[in-house]
Structure formats: structure tokens, C-alpha cells
Amino acid sequence: MRTVTITGTRQTGHKDLAEYADLFEQYLNPFARAAHFYIGGAAGIDSLALLWLADRTSAAITIVAPGTMDRQPAEAQEAVARSRGRIKEVVELGAAELQSPAYHARNRWMVDHTSMTIGFPHATEPSTGTWQTIDYTAEQGKPRLIVPV
């Protein structure tokens, strides 16, 4: 079974939900039949991808939080609660402070536990956690698929 990290921008208001659904259909669905997706449990792409995968596929889903889920944004908590029956596992890494180092550690953890990354960076954000995750995936010699949004 292929294991896939999903990473992406938190800023998703520049497209409507139908556009994201179309992107996920094109770039996540081809892997969904035989994949286990690891998603960061944050707002934005993480929550949108979780809801899409839970509603439209039978793929295994693991949510990974840098601290605990009760410290994640409300949007993310709601998406996880709504998809609870479809989530195989929630991993809480227990970071005391939810600053950039905790999110980067969470992203590296996901890449270390998966065989590839699909990234959805915002086109105008060249230096973000999404790109750091994509770059870390490359450093590990793993495939990555980049879908600018």
C-alpha cells in the first residue's frame, strides 16, 4: 500500500470548494484506491483534503497534529470530528509550543512515515511549511507531486 503525505497552504479562500474538489479528483483520486494518506490536521488544504477523502474515497486516513487536536484550529477540529468514522488514526505529537518548529517536526514526521508527498502550495508563498515539506521529501529521495493552488 502506498503511503502519502498531503501538505498545503492554509490560505484557501482564493478558490471555491468546487475548484478544490476538482483538483483533489485529479491529483488525489488516482492514488486513493491503494493508499493511506497522512494529513496534518490543520486548516486550509489539510481540512479540505480530509473532508474530500472521507466523503469520496475509501482510502485510509491518518491525522497528525503537532501538539494535540484540541489545540488545532476550529476548522480542523470540525473536519476531524465530521470525518471521525473514516479516520484510521489520530497521532498527537505533543509539542508544548505550537510555533514553526513544531509544525516542521510534524511535517518531517509525516514524510518519514510515508513513501511520497503531494503538495498544494499557494503560488505566491515561496517559503512556507508546504515548501519545506516538499523539499524535505526531495532530500529523502522520495517522489513528490506539486499542485500549485
Image (cartoon, rainbow, N blue to C red):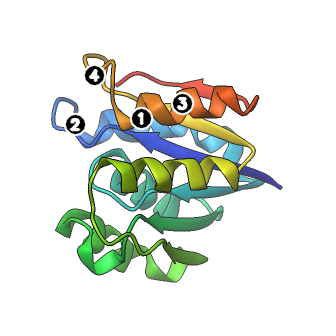
Disc 1 element = helix
Residue sitting nearer the eye, 127 or 1: 127
Is the residue marked by circle 4 packed among few (<14), some (14-19), or many (20+) residues within 10 Å? few
Label 4 or label 2, whichever lies nearer to me, is: 4
Disc 2 element = loop
Q: Mark 1 and mark 4 in contact (Cβ < 8 Å)?
A: yes
What's the residue at 27%, 22% (across, down)?
125
Kind of residue at disc 2: Asp
Residue sitting nearer the eye, 127 or 29: 127
Q: Is residue 85 above or below residue 11?
A: below
Disc 4 element = loop
Q: Position of residue 1 (x, y in %)?
A: 83, 56
Q: Mark 1 and mark 3 in contact (Cβ < 8 Å)?
A: yes
What's the residue at 48%, 56% (across, down)?
106
User: What is the residue that sits farthest to the right in this orientation?
Assistant: 1
Q: Mark 1 and mark 2 in contact (Cβ < 8 Å)?
A: no
The numbered mark, 3 or 2, whose residue comes first in the sequence reads: 2
The numbered mark, 4 or 2, whose residue comes first in the sequence reads: 2
Q: Position of residue 72 (x, y in %)?
A: 27, 68
- The numbered mark at residue 134 is 3
Q: Tell me: 1 left or right of 61.
A: right
Is the residue marked by circle 2 packed among few (<14), some (14-19), or many (20+) residues within 10 Å? few
Label 2 or label 1, whichever lies nearer to me, is: 1
Q: CA distance from mark 2 to mark 1?
A: 20 Å
The numbered mark, 4 or 3, whose residue comes first in the sequence reads: 4
Q: Tell me: 26 left or right of 95.
A: right
- The numbered mark at residue 66 is none
| Residue bearing the label numbered 4 | 125
Q: Tell me: 91 left or right of 48.
A: right
Kind of residue at disc 3: Ile
| Residue bearing the label numbered 1 | 130
| Residue bearing the label numbered 2 | 16
